[in-house]
Structures are given as C-alpha cells and as structure tokens.
Amino acid sequence: MRTEEVLFGLEEGVEPWPNLAGRLGISPEELRAILLALRGQGFPVLVEEEGAGLPPGTPAPQVLLPRLRGKLGRPYRYLGTTTTTQDVLRKWWEAPPGALVLAEQQTHGRGRLGRPWQSPAGNLYFSLLLPEVDPLLPFRAGLALSDAAGVGSLKWPNDLLAPDGQKIAGILVEREKSRVILGVGINVERGPIPGSAALAEFRPVHRAQLLADFLWHLEQWLWVNANDVLLAWKARNITIGRRVAVQLGTQVFEGEALDLGPQGELILRTSAGLRKIQAGEVGLL
Ligand code: BTN
C-alpha cells in the first residue's frame, strides 16, 4: 500500500489498530512501519499502544478540504518536512490561482527582508498562489489573519502581534511575472524565537480550522475596495500614532508614524521632514 494512501486515510485522534488496519485493508505490522516512516518525513502521526491517527487539527487534506468554504486552498499539497513552501509552490508550474502548499516543518523557511523563518513542528507554514491583486495585498492578508486568529493587533505592514506585543504570525509576498506567492507563517503551538509567541497561549486552536478561516476571510478581503481595506487595517493596527524606528538594511529612520499612503506606505514624521517608507522592519519605541 502506498504511503500517501495511509496518510490520507488517517482520522483525527487515535483509532484502535484493528479498526484502522481493517479500514485501510493492511496488516497492523505493515501499517505501523508506514506510520513510523511518515513520522520520519515530518508528519505528526500518532503511533500509540492502542492505535494510531492524527493529532486533532492536523491540516491533512481529509481534515482541511471539508472545512474550506470558498475557492482558495484548492488544489492542495500537504507536505511533511520541506525546504520552504514558497519554492515548492514556485516550482509547481501548472498550479492554478488558489493552489496551496503547506508543510509541517521547513528547513529553509524565509521571512521578509531576507531573514530566516524558524519553522519547527506544531505551527502553520503555507504558501498560496494568487493572481496580482493590488499593492494592498499584504494588508488584505494581514486583516484575514487577524480575523482568523481573533486576537492581537497588526503591526506595519502585516505582522500579527499577540496582546502582549510578541509576534504570532508574519506574511511574505513574493512576485514572479504575474503570479503572486503569498507565504504565511503562524506560530500556533510554539513561538520559536525570542519576541515571538504562540496563538495557542491565548485561545484553543484547531490548525486546519484556523487555516480554512484564514482562506475564507482572505477571499472576502480580496474584493473590498482599497479605501475600506486601509480603514479596517488602521482600526486594528498598533503602529500609527506611535514613535517608531524603521530599519531597512543598515538605514534606520526614527519618527512618528502618522498615517498610511494610498499604497500602504508608512508615512513617518522624522526630524528631517515627512518620509514615505515602502519596506522595513518597524520597532515600536
Ligand atoms: C515575516 O518575515 O514576517 C514573514 C514570514 C513568512 C513565513 C512563511 S512560512 C510559509 C512560507 N514559507 C516560507 O519560507 N516563508 C513563508
């Protein structure tokens, strides 16, 4: 029996060995060997004395797909450990808009501004293929993240911060010709670096449901006019009105974050006058 058939045949929770083996039409010994191999590939399968299955919330296709309410998220590739979902999706030439790649762990996860994105087991790491929308896509995605998470606030341009100011999630937008690859990392169970937090510290999380909710909300935000996107983002942000330091490479601009420009630029009042910031890492002072 092929490994994928076993992976995609598992249910959430622990199912007794005789049931599972009978349902999949495979001997318990062979089943156990396949499950252990899947674990070795980075999939979070439960292999216990009494039975086997998936931890509740595992975003395997059989758990995620029935929860999708819109068009985003199909077709879907579910991976164990990979380099980065951004590259897997980029190389999936025939993928149509809406295609989704998710990995349980990444060895070369990347963040904005060329930084690494630590990707241990237990969190969500996924990339979504979209047609070019407009320069506000990162803000639309930030709003969808905030809707799905239900806690925290947004820091320019699209970090989701926990109520205590630690980072829960980030968004990376990469463009290639007319294709846009939107990468999202959400710390669900683990905030892997200092200054990060896990969403599960603030509310119970079913990872597949959280992902389905994000995709649904994003689909709605893609249709909202630019002005309303900016207004909604401002209502949930913690950057505007604060003194900030924006770092871009070796340059640091310090000043008061006054507003957003029409394309989502951060308008900063510095000692040298007004500046429009297109990209950078904001530190709240
Ligand atoms: C940020 O710097 O805040 C953006 C982080 C984006 C991380 C996600 S995880 C899934 C996708 N694959 C990657 O390598 N990066 C993005």
Image (spheres, helix red, strand yellow):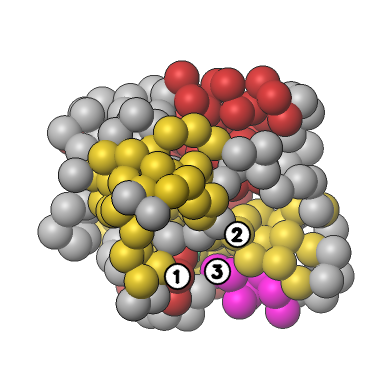
Check the image and report above or below for 227 versus 52.
above
Residue 118 in view? yes
In this picture, residue 264 sits left or right of residue 284: right
Which amino acid type is marked by label 3? Thr
Check the image and report above or below for 254 versus 165.
below
Provide the residue designation for mark 3. 85
Foreground mark, 3 or 1, reads 1
The residues tagged by marks 2 and 1 sit, at their Cα atoms, a distance apart of 11 Å
In this picture, residue 134 sits left or right of residue 239: right
Secondary structure of the magenta portion, mostly?
Answer: helix
Q: Residue at x 49, y 51 (%)?
A: 275
Q: Percent from the top left, x then y, of residue 73?
A: 68, 46
Residue 81 in view? no
Is label 3 within 8 A of ligand 1 (CB to nearest ligand atom)?
Answer: yes
Provide the residue designation for mark 1. 113
Foreground mark, 2 or 1, reads 1
Question: Is 108 within the magenta?
Answer: no
